[in-house]
Amino acid sequence: MRLRGSASGRLPALLLSVLVLPMPVGAVWGQSIDALVHEGAIDAPVEAVWRAWTTSEGLKSWLAPHADIDLRIGGKMRTNYDAAGSLDDANAIENTILSFEPERMLSVRVTNAPEDFPFAATIGDMWTVVYFVPGARDQTVVRIVSLGFTVEADSQAMRAFFDQGNAATLQQMRQRLGRAAP
């Protein structure tokens, strides 16, 4: 197929053929385009919800008995859900802070999973963004979005794991800071 107006005619034809190639729904170059999203209202103002996510004391108050956060780009958020454990044992989780906008957004990537985490080979492909949106009557809408899952079976199994985990995280925060309709 030759198109007029080009020196060789091949480049436009090549580009056209690339643009019309069928692409599997939900996948682009092996990446799932389906973000994992959990959202709900918390009966607390955005300042309180932000502090609960971004301070060591805040994280300990609702998420994990052992928690530490260094809120800066490249800083670490470390947690251990085992009350008998520590932040330095094999069950600790380390997230690296990728970006944040105070009282609006925090993004992290797991950089050290627990020793027995079943998806250790794929955890580095995903990241999570948490949005904090002021709502009515001193509520905050928290939106947890996890991204970077591939179409591979173990990545999809990890997605299912985080589907349950992120829902539980949101419910746990609701219980700590107040209930509101999802």
Image (spheres, rainbow, N blue to C red):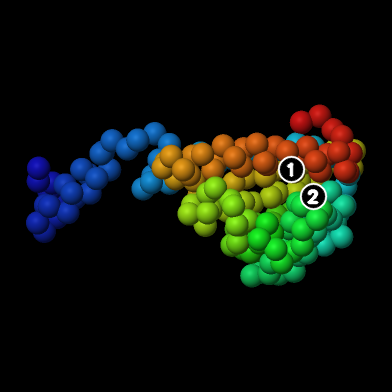
Residue 154, given in percent of the width and then of the height, sits at 46, 43
> Crowding near pointer 2: few (<14 within 10 Å), some, many (20+)?
some
- Give the residue drawn at x 78%, y 37%: 171
In the figure, is residue 35 to the left or right of 138?
Answer: left
Q: Amino acid at mark 2?
A: Leu
User: What residue sits right under mark 2 in the picture?
Assistant: 63
- Give the residue drawn at x 62%, y 45%: 145
> Crowding near pointer 1: few (<14 within 10 Å), some, many (20+)?
some
Q: Is residue 167 visible?
A: yes
Residue 85, given in percent of the width and then of the height, sits at 77, 58
Can you say which quadrant of the picture contains the C terminus? top right
User: What residue sits right under mark 1 in the picture?
Assistant: 169
In the figure, is residue 51 to the left or right of 119?
Answer: right
Task: Out of 105 and 95, give the one closest to the viewer.
Answer: 95
Q: Is residue 77 visible?
A: no
In the figure, is residue 116 to the left or right of 78?
Answer: left
Labels 1 and 2: the sequence-earlier one: 2
Q: Residue furthest front?
A: 84
Residue 46, given in percent of the width and then of the height, sits at 83, 50
- Asked which quadrant contains residue 65, the reply is bottom right
* Element under disc 1: helix
Badge 1 vs badge 2, beta-carbon distance below 8 Å:
yes
* Element under disc 2: loop
- Asked which quadrant contains residue 95, the reply is bottom right
